[in-house]
Image (spheres, grey):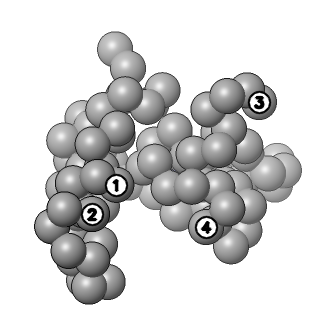
């Protein structure tokens, strides 16, 4: 919980857009740090090791959804600052 709780700390998706309201922990409870797309049953759904991989992945997803380049940049510019990618 805290100020970062509004956004998934892996992909940056607003929590309000997560239809499940968050990822799931290994015990089945809701994880409030990561979204349901990134985190299921206590594990990440991807094998990414660097924020650039997530940025690329999210941009491709947004492109497929018909989102223009400026918005793709805007929606992904903060991903490298999320807790998962902090070194
Ligand atoms: Zn996510």
Secondary-structure class at tag 4: helix
Query: How many residues crowd around disc 4 within 10 Å: few (fewer than 14), some, or many (20 or more)?
Result: few
Furthest toward the front, the residue is: 70
| Residue ID for mark 1 | 75
Q: Are marks 2 and 3 in contact (CB under 8 Å)?
A: no
Measure the alpha-carbon separation of dots 4 and 3. Answer: 18 Å
Q: Earlier in the sequence, mark 4 or mark 3?
A: 3
Query: How many residues crowd around disc 1 within 10 Å: few (fewer than 14), some, or many (20 or more)?
Result: some
Q: Are marks 1 and 2 in contact (CB under 8 Å)?
A: yes
Furthest toward the top, the residue is: 87
Instruction: Report the residue at 21% width, 54% height from top.
Output: 73
Secondary-structure class at tag 3: loop
Secondary-structure class at tag 2: helix
Label annotation for residue 1 = 3
Query: How many residues crowd around disc 3 within 10 Å: few (fewer than 14), some, or many (20 or more)?
Result: few
* Quadrant containing the N terminus in the rendered view: top right
Instruction: Report the residue at 27% width, 42% height from top.
Output: 77
Measure the alpha-carbon separation of dots 1 and 2. Answer: 6 Å
């Amino acid at each position: 919980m805290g100020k970062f709780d509004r956004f998934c700390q892996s992909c940056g998706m607003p929590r309000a857009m997560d239809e499940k309201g968050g990822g799931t922990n290994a015990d089945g409870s809701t994880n409030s740090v990561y979204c349901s797309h990134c985190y299921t049953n206590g594990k990440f759904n991807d094998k990414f090791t660097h924020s650039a991989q997530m940025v690329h992945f999210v941009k491709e997803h947004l492109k497929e959804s018909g989102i223009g380049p400026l918005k793709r940049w805007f929606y992904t510019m903060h991903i490298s600052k999320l807790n998962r990618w902090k070194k």
